[in-house]
């Protein structure tokens, strides 16, 4: 027998459970991220400050030299404690090399080179968020500096603030050009976030991340005068090749003037940093991502020409997951057809690598992609955005992503009403409420804790779709079988209690949660991308319009389903589930292909219709054909059972 379940209490308990599980996962991820950030900060500190401890083999400051040895040992210990990865041993080897160099009083240039190299390798092996979510506000940074930093570091950043004399360790002078050339904005951000052990520099982790980035950019500008910034602006606007060196915010915040000087000279590097640290908005985030795509594709082609097919494939996959996938939501909102053409072309390029096409044929594919990326740059430019396009993009995204989940949830609600089993309804409601809560936590994690990589996005969508498709397959066949039965009232009275056992109720919860969370997850990614472009009012208006449209659709389905005879209701519902099964199967395999989990074999004769999950690859079509065959077999067995049952009744 069913036990009455409160509609309010069950979702609350499930939401709390979901939050606890999420907090455990987030806590573990945050702990690892914190260790990586601390290790990176120590390496940055060694690279910058070692020159003040040792010069030409002579110890200048015994206390600072002891600190350098201590920090190097801490780096080695923290690296050893990180989760096991193939790259960790190489990191430990470099850490030992760093310790050896410091112990032998090596030149500052050599120690800085090892420390910077190890820091870069660390972030490559254990990625952490390396760039702000939006362009930092330099004016906001100035206000924050005046409120929090000027008392010690001085209004001019020279380290002579009114409280500086009270400190045992003198504040850093941001005007020190030699020191500033060794430090990146990311290094400043880390110190602002975590503070500096052994000094009066506190942690400002309580400030929002956007404020910390703004503060880091402002602190990083003092060493480079306004005249240099004016020259940097001229260089940036006249020399397009400089945009390739600093294509995006991620590259800008990780670059040091010293490293940039090795490519363009110190004077140009200083001028460029003076300008871009004052005007980070000059570096386009979107065009930078496309630059990453172009760069990885060029490297992939070069690796293929040398015979390294594996490396070529890895770079091609990274071009999509790290370069194109993060901007896919914004491009889809502005030109979905172009987005799908690029997505398909990149998949075909990876398939061509797997099949061993000639290098010249691959070069032709890269050229086609370059042309498409040119179109994408135009579509993503600020001039191409408008309040109307943002409104339509927000409305279309939510309507498209929400419709699949809505159809499934409403069908289950209508089914339970028809069966007069209202006590089961809380499980369905708990499923979609829990999915919304999990979606909110996903947004929090993606925004403030850890970034969600392109691979994680595709894997979540892919496995979620495949899992939902398998469940819907069984639901569709089951509903079709019930549509053929007679004497519905007797069936409901005698069979439903058994059919809707406790396990089945949790089955309904699980199905509802999966199908709704999948769509919520995807919608969050789209809306986060749109929000970073501004026009918040247009986005909210689009979202509200889509919600209103979905509410009308849900009301119409529920109202119409009440008037349907139970047999027809199950027939229509079974066909709806069958269609969604095929759609989700295609979409799930396509997402796993984009994540590099499933290989790609293109089908030239098949069109791409993503709305119904049809993609021109052998694997996606095969998955859909398999689902259709399973549905046909299940429906045929249902009809055979009915025919057999009717024959026995007549006899």
Image: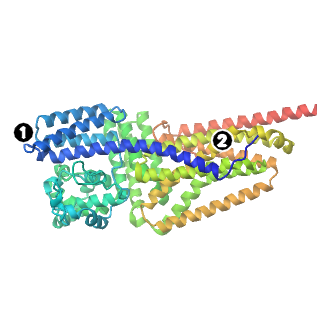
Identified at 32% across, 58% down, the residue is: 212
The disc placed on residue 211 is none
Residue 222 visible at all: no
State the CA–CA distance, disc 2 to disc 1.
Answer: 70 Å
The disc placed on residue 506 is 2
Q: Residues within 10 Å of mark 1 (few under 14, many from 20)?
A: few
Quadrant of the frame with the N terminus: top right
Are circles 2 and 1 on residues that touch, CB within 8 Å? no
What colour scheme has been applied to the protein in the rendered image? rainbow
Residue 173 visible at all: yes
Please indicate whether residue 530 sits to the left or right of residue 103 in the image: right
Q: Nearer the viewer, residue 227 or 103?
A: 103
Is label 2 in a helix, a strand or a loop?
helix
Identified at 79% across, 43% down, the residue is: 483
Q: In this view, does 121 lie above or below 532?
A: above
Report x, y in % for residue 356. Answer: 41, 33
Between discs 2 and 1, the one toward the N terminus: 1
Report x, y in % for residue 77. Answer: 27, 35
Q: Name the residue under label 1.
A: 57
Residue lying at the far right of the rendered structure: 651
Q: Which of 281 and 67 is in front in this view?
A: 67
Please indicate whether residue 7 sits to the left or right of residue 321 in the image: right
Is label 1 in a helix, a strand or a loop?
loop
């Amino acid at each position: 027998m069913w036990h009455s379940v409160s509609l309010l209490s069950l979702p609350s308990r499930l939401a709390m459970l979901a939050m606890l599980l999420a907090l455990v996962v987030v806590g573990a991820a945050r702990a690892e991220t914190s260790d990586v950030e601390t290790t990176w900060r120590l390496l940055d500190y060694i690279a910058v400050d070692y020159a003040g401890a040792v010069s030409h083999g002579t110890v200048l400051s015994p206390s600072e030299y002891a600190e350098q040895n201590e920090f190097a040992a801490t780096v080695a210990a923290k690296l050893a404690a990180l989760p096991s990865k193939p790259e960790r041993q190489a990191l430990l080897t470099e850490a030992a090399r760093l310790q050896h160099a410091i112990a032998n009083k090596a030149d500052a240039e050599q120690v800085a080179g090892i420390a910077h190299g190890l820091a870069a390798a660390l972030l490559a092996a254990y990625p952490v968020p390396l760039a702000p979510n939006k362009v930092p506000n330099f004016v906001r940074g100035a206000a924050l500096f005046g409120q929090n930093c000027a008392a010690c570091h001085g209004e001019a950043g020279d380290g002579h603030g009114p409280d500086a004399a009270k400190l045992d360790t003198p504040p850093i002078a941001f005007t020190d050009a030699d020191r500033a050339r060794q430090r990146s904005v990311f290094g400043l951000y880390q110190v602002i976030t975590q503070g500096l052990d052994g000094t009066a520099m506190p942690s400002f982790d309580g400030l929002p991340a956007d404020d910390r980035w703004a503060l880091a950019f402002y602190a990083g500008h003092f060493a480079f005068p306004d005249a240099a910034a004016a020259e940097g602006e001229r260089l940036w606007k006249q020399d397009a090749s400089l945009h390739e060196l600093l294509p995006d915010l991620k590259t800008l915040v990780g670059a040091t003037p010293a490293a940039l000087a090795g490519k363009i000279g110190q004077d140009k590097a200083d001028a460029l940093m003076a300008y871009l640290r004052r005007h980070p908005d000059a570096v386009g985030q979107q065009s930078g991502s496309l630059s990453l795509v172009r760069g990885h594709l060029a490297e992939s082609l070069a690796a293929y020409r040398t015979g390294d097919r594996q490396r070529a494939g890895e770079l091609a996959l990274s071009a999509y997951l790290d370069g194109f996938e993060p901007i896919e939501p914004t491009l889809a909102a502005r030109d979905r057809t172009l987005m799908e053409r690029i997505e398909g072309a990149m998949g075909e390029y990876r398939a061509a690598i797997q099949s061993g096409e000639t290098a010249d044929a691959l070069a032709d594919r890269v050229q086609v992609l370059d042309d498409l990326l040119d179109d994408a740059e135009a579509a993503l430019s600020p001039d191409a955005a408008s309040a109307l396009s943002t409104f339509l993009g927000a409305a279309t995204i939510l309507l498209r992503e929400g419709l699949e989940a809505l159809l499934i949830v409403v069908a289950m609600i209508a089914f339970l009403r028809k069966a007069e089993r209202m006590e089961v309804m809380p499980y369905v409601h708990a499923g979609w409420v829990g999915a919304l809560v999990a979606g909110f936590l996903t947004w929090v994690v993606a925004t403030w804790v850890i970034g969600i990589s392109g691979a994680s996005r595709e894997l979540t969508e892919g496995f979620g779709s495949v899992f939902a498709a398998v469940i819907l397959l069984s639901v569709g066949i089951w509903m079709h079988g019930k549509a053929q039965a007679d004497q519905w009232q007797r069936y409901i009275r005698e069979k439903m209690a058994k059919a809707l056992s406790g396990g089945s109720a949790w089955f309904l919860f699980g199905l509802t949660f999966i199908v709704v969370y999948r769509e919520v997850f995807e919608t969050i990614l789209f809306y986060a991308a749109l929000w970073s472009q501004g026009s918040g009012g247009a986005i909210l208006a689009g979202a509200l319009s889509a919600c209103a449209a979905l509410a009308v659709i849900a009301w119409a389905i529920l109202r119409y389903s009440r008037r349907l005879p139970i047999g027809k209701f199950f027939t229509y519902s079974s066909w709806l589930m069958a269609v969604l099964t095929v759609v989700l199967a295609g979409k799930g395999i396509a997402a796993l292909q984009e994540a590099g989990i499933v290989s790609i074999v293109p089908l030239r004769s098949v069109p791409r219709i993503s709305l119904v999950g049809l993609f021109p690859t052998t694997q996606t079509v095969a998955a859909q054909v398999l689902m259709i065959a399973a549905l046909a077999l299940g429906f045929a067995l249902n009809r055979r059972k009915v025919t057999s049952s009717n024959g026995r009744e007549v006899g």
